[in-house]
Amino acid sequence: VSAGRAARAFRVIGTRVPKLDAVEKVTGAVQYLPDLEVPGMAWGKILRTPVPHARIRRIDTRRAEALPGVLAVVTGRTVEQRPFGYARDHLALKPDVVRCIRDEVAAVAAETEAVAAEACRLIEVDYEELPAVFDPVAALRPGAPRIHAEFPGNLVNFSYRFSAGDVDGAFREADVVAEGTYTLNYVTTACLGTMAAIAAWDPRGNLTMWSTTQIPFLYQRDLAEALGISGDRVRVLQPPVGGNFGRGLDLYPIDIIAALLSRHAARPVKIVFDREEEFLASPTREPCVFTLRTAARADGTLLARDARVVIDNGAYVSWGSTTPYVMMTTLAGFYRCPNVRFDSAIVYTNNVYSGSMRGYGNLESTFAVEAQMDELAGRLGLDRLEIRRRNANRPGDVTPQGLRITTCALAECFDAVARDVARPLDRPARPGWRRGVGYAGMFHVGGGARVYRSDGCGAIVKLDDFGKVTLITGASEIGQGSETVLAMIVAEELGIPFGRVDVVNSDTAVKPWDVGVHASRTTFIAGNAALLAARDVRRQLLELAARELEEPPEALDVEDGHVFVGAAPARRVAYEKVVRAGHFREGGRILIGQAFYDPPTQMLDKDFRGNVSVTYGFAAQAALVEVEEATGKVEVLRVASAHDVGRALNPIGCEGQIEGGIHMGLGYCLSEELRLQDGRVLNPGFLDYKLLTAPDMPEILITLIETVDEAGPFGAKGLGEAGTIPISAAVANAVADATGVRVTELPMTPERVYRAIAAARSAGGGSTTRAVPPARATDPPTSEANPCD
Amino acid sequence: VSAPDRYPLELRVNGRPVRRAVPGSRTLLELLREDLRLTGTNLACDTGDCGACTVLVDGRPVTACLVLALDADGAEVTTVEGLAARWQAQSGAPPPTLHPVQQGFLDEGGAQCGFCTAGMVVAAAALLEANPAPSDAEIRAGLEGNLCRCTGYVKIVGAVQAAASRMRQARGPGR
């Protein structure tokens, strides 16, 4: 959608606008889902299995039912429910078999949360334990315990296989080949606000859900299906949510169980996960083992990549199983690489199951790709930035999958981070610590992502008789600032002060359809919808004002809440006056604009070819680290992060997304790991699952590069995930630069780094951990301007 | 002899007197959120690890999930809802002036999802009462017990610095 306003300077776009909901948040007035009380509300609690794989012999709920204050007890044997989830491969309450430690066996509704919890303790369940398997490689072996009867080899029946060009031929011709296997960890979104739901049925059989979902309309359909009712019976309300980051991209048992409890208790029922439950039973990022080979010519030109990923899917299919979709896009598209082969195995195990998490699939593949860019540079004696610039994507490129690169400032992003990371550091070198710098880049969908048949979003813009504008958008606010940037777009297009735009975005009974918050799509897709709807109402406004000003609509323009005559700006009329004239005149009209924006893109076909996004976002990051040789501790001192954002509509929001993304990516890289042993989560709390704290965070230097993409709203591209994606690769490359040792398993805990250093040392700098020659030994020092030197 | 179900409790919350009879096991956070319906303070871990429920007890920041309500007997408790009034009393600023920390978080983008914000602004207000001119490193160290999943803490540090300079200005030279 073209901006069409290039001639005039922006008044709202590009300014630093605080979030619309910030006042509520800083004063504590905000009402998150756990804060809400619905009249007559009861509390729900879920009983989970203590064993990861078992047949349920018997469930006895009599003692729970007899407890005063208990309103309803439900089990998989007492309720009607239908399979749900991405592959419809499980039921919310498990009637016969439990397959992972989070599995829901029974649930209670009671007058208070404490009574509900006590009643759960009184439910007796007899389990016949079954052999279990927790390692995907073991699960693929013949004779491994079978997790789903219908999948004898424990393979999820999704095939993500892609090939382009002559991969074997390219490897034969290559001057150098990098090889590696990368083991990537279980992490979880660890939102500060846990998953929660309130379900309330009315006497006519309509269900109202207050939910932490980020896909309200798909959720409406999926929840109805799981409950065996029609979608029109379900209304979804989305109160402010304490983070999501992909957690709410699927339907999960909490929502179905809340609805079942409410139906059986004939009362509204609220379920709020406690922290331990959040760590057990909210979706994780998928752990995976990534094997990659990269072939290049002596000048560094990439020839081919050959990759295989094995994903631990856990017990059921949610979005984690679909991450190869994104992984292959990076493998086949990030940096120019003509010959590509990608294969995957997605394996059922008795572990907790994975969903989507910010940047999904792309962190994993970028980690492998960028490790090998450094390895190739080292082997070829090339500058690490030079090999990246040489292979960088450029405008006009078409990737082997058919992704069409339009605007692309990848090379400029590398220039910016090389400059910023080399700024003087006012911190002396410490004895026993070695400094290093690492680089990594990324590309990601930036103009929506057609992962469903629709990638659309609707918007309605209403002008009222006080001159106030209401944007009713399908897009969901999950803390990322979408409502603020959408209001800015409307204010800019309508020529109205930002403070006069309100946003309604949290009720499926009111807002138009949207496919959901994912793939960094909201600013681009919902932004285009809002822009088109604003343009629609602007046209109507000018038509109506034409009568007031006695000039044709083409002669009119808008600014600061007034319609004015272009040739005589003093002749003007306020919006509210125009709108009132519409309301109070015979043959009157209301001023409502609307639009549905669904981008001109394609789903990947059966061969995984198609242009899934209108445009793509690019970024580069550089990390400056210190590694303590005696302990293996890695400290990140500085991160430079440069992003091709198309246009920075709200720079404060852009920076916030990047800074938060770096925090999440650094946690993945350095400290976060959901530790499972025999399917049990060993660290279900913030004391042992280590989010980085304020003192842990490095200095962050951000550059926003504006390529003004003609397809984006005022030129913007998606950004929400970009900060998360390359950082773990950049840090791993910096650690290799500092120590000469490449760590191929995340998180890079001191123990893991120490062992890698020690192993390399005992092998005489040898190959047990696949040591990479220190980059400084080979890189021309002038071009990298390494501040460690 | 069985212990009584409830014990008398008197304290002041955000400047107002509160008199209740509470079970011995009731936490200060439960008292605030459930009995007094002051839901601005959030429950995020219930184990004192995240700082989301930070409130001031007699001016000192505590995680309300780890404090028994009865241990606050006789105390003056300030929650996020009372922070603006606390500043107005300290500075003479008229209502509805926000606490400079709140204004800083608002202006600088210190809140994204906002779930940590209540605890974060209360902790930062206490930090600035103790140290009116902190370095960035001192702010980071002072907020170490408050987890944020959205911001990477960058805008939070900026918000606290903005607040510090606003508070120094409000208090005038020599302070």
Image (spheres, rainbow, N blue to C red):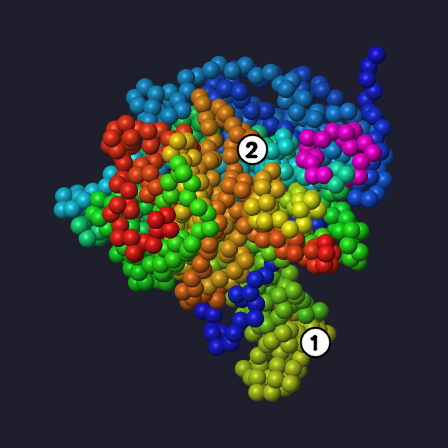
Q: Is residue B20 visible?
A: yes
Residue A148 falls within the magenta-colored stretch: no
Q: Secondary structure at mark 2?
A: loop
- Residue at 47% x, 22% y is A52
Distance of mark 1 from mark 2, alpha carbons?
A: 56 Å
- Residue at 37% x, 48% y is A788
CB of mark 1 within 8 Å of CB of mark 2?
no
**Left or right: A223 with respect to A519?**
right
Camera-side residue: B139 or A2?
Answer: B139
For the residue marked with disc 1, what is the amino acid? Answer: Lys
B53 relative to A132, above or below = below
Question: Tag on residue A686?
Answer: 2
Tell me, yes or no, whether dots 1 and 2 are on the same chain. Answer: yes
Q: Is residue A325 visible?
A: no
Q: Secondary structure at mark 1?
A: helix
The part of the chain drawn in magenta is B60-77
Q: Earlier in the sequence, mark 1 or mark 2?
A: 1
Residue A609 x, y percent position in the rendering: 30, 51
Quadrant placement of the N terminus of chain A: bottom left
Question: Tag on residue A577?
Answer: 1
Q: Given this view, does label 1 or label 2 mark the residue nearer the observer? A: 2
For the residue marked with disc 2, what is the amino acid? Answer: Phe
B156 relative to A14, above or below = above
- Residue at 68% x, 70% y is A467
Q: Classify 10 Å Cα crowding around label 2: few (below 14), some (14-19), many (20 and above).
A: some
